[in-house]
Amino acid sequence: MTKQQPLRIALAGGGAFGAKHAAALRRIEGVEVAAAVSSSLDGARRFAAEQGIARAAGSLEEVLAMDDVDAVVLATPTPLHAAQTRQCLAAGKHVQVEIPVAASLPDAEACAAAAERTGLVAMAGHTRRFNPSHQWVRRRVAAGELTIQQLDVQTYFFRRSNLNALGRQRSWTDHLLWHHAAHTVDLFAYQTGSPIVRANALQGPLHPELGIAMDMSVQLRTASGAICTLSLSFNNDGPLGTFFRYIGDTGTYLARYDDLVTGEDEPIDVSGIDVSLDGIELQDREFVAAIREGREPNASLAQVLPCYRTLADLERQLTAAPVGA
C-alpha cells in the first residue's frame, strides 16, 4: 500500500459510536469506509445505507476475509472487544478498538501480546488523549508551565435500566469500572507523565437485576505525587457526561468534553489546538496516520496496558470487600 492508495477501513458496530466513527472517517482524506458489519446482516445494511457505506457484511469473519480491507474499527459491544481485536490481528488487519480493550487484565494482555507479535497498528479508543481541551492542558504540562497537583473527575449518567446511548435496549451490560473509569485512569497517568502507584476503590449497592455497582469512588496517586479523585454514577439525575477539574500549581482548568474554562469559568479557545474539535475524528486521524507512517500510534495497546492493570487491581479490592462487609 502506498500513500497514494486509499486506506480501506471496515467499520464494525452499527450503534451510536459506530455512527460517530463513520462521520469522522468521512472527513479524513484518502480514507474509504469499505464495509460495515453489525449484529445482523439486516442491521448492517440499514447502518450502511444511513452512513453511505457501499457494502454491508453479515459477520466480522466475512469482513476479515476481504482482500480490499486494510484495517478495522471495532465499535462493538464491550464483551466482544478482546476476541475481535485478536481476530483482526490474526487476519493481518490493523485494528482500532473502542474502549475498553477488554473487561479483564488477561484479555487486555493477550491483545497487547498479539499486537506485538504481528507488528500491526493496534490502537485503543482512549478518546480523552485526543480531545482538544485535554491536549491544551497536556501542552502546558509539557512546556513546564503547569504541574498537575490534583485531577477531580465526575462521570455521571442516568441508567437505571439497560439502555444504550441511543435509548435502545442493550444486549450486554455496561460497567462503571472497566469502561467509564478506564477513561480517567488512563488520562491521569498520561497527563501527569507519571505511573499510577496507588489505587483505591469503593462501590455502592449492586443493581438487583443488572448485578453491577451503580455508584463508585476511585482514588489514584502517581509516582510524582499527583492525586486523582473520581466519582462515577449511573444514578445521577442531572447534567450527564464527564467533567474534569485540573488543579495545578499555576492554574485550575475545567474540561467538559471539547470545552475548556478556567477555574473562574472563563472560556479558553481550543479551536487552534488541532485540525478538528471532534475527539473521535482526531483519534481516527491518529489511527490512519500511524498506519500510513508505519509507527506506533498514541494510545497503542502497549501504551494503555498499565490502565488495565490498575483496573484489575481496583476490581480485586472491590471483590475482596463487598458492600456491607
Image (cartoon, rainbow, N blue to C red):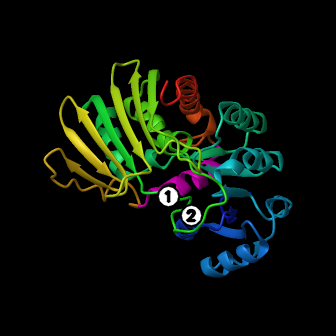
Residue at 55 percent of width and 56 percent of height = 284
- Across and down, in percent, residue 293 comes to 62, 48
- Across and down, in percent, residue 44 comes to 72, 73
Q: Is residue 319 part of the magenta span, yes or no? A: no
Q: Which residues are magenta?
A: 278-294
Which amino acid does the dot numbered 1 rest on?
A: Ile
Which residue has dot 2 on it? 21
Q: Main secondary structure of the magenta part?
A: helix
Q: Is residue 145 above or below residue 214?
A: above
Mark number displayed over residue 280:
1
Q: Which residue appears farthest toward the left when viewing the image?
A: 264
Q: Is residue 286 part of the magenta span, yes or no? A: yes
Residue at 41 percent of width and 18 percent of height = 223
| Tags 1 and 2 touching, CB below 8 Å | yes
Q: Secondary structure at mark 2?
A: helix
Residue 322 vs residue 153, the one in the foreground = 322
Which amino acid does the dot numbered 2 rest on?
A: His
Taking the image as shown, residue 169 lies to the left or right of residue 274, namely right
Taking the image as shown, residue 112 lies to the left or right of residue 89, namely left
Q: Is residue 14 above or below residue 218?
A: below
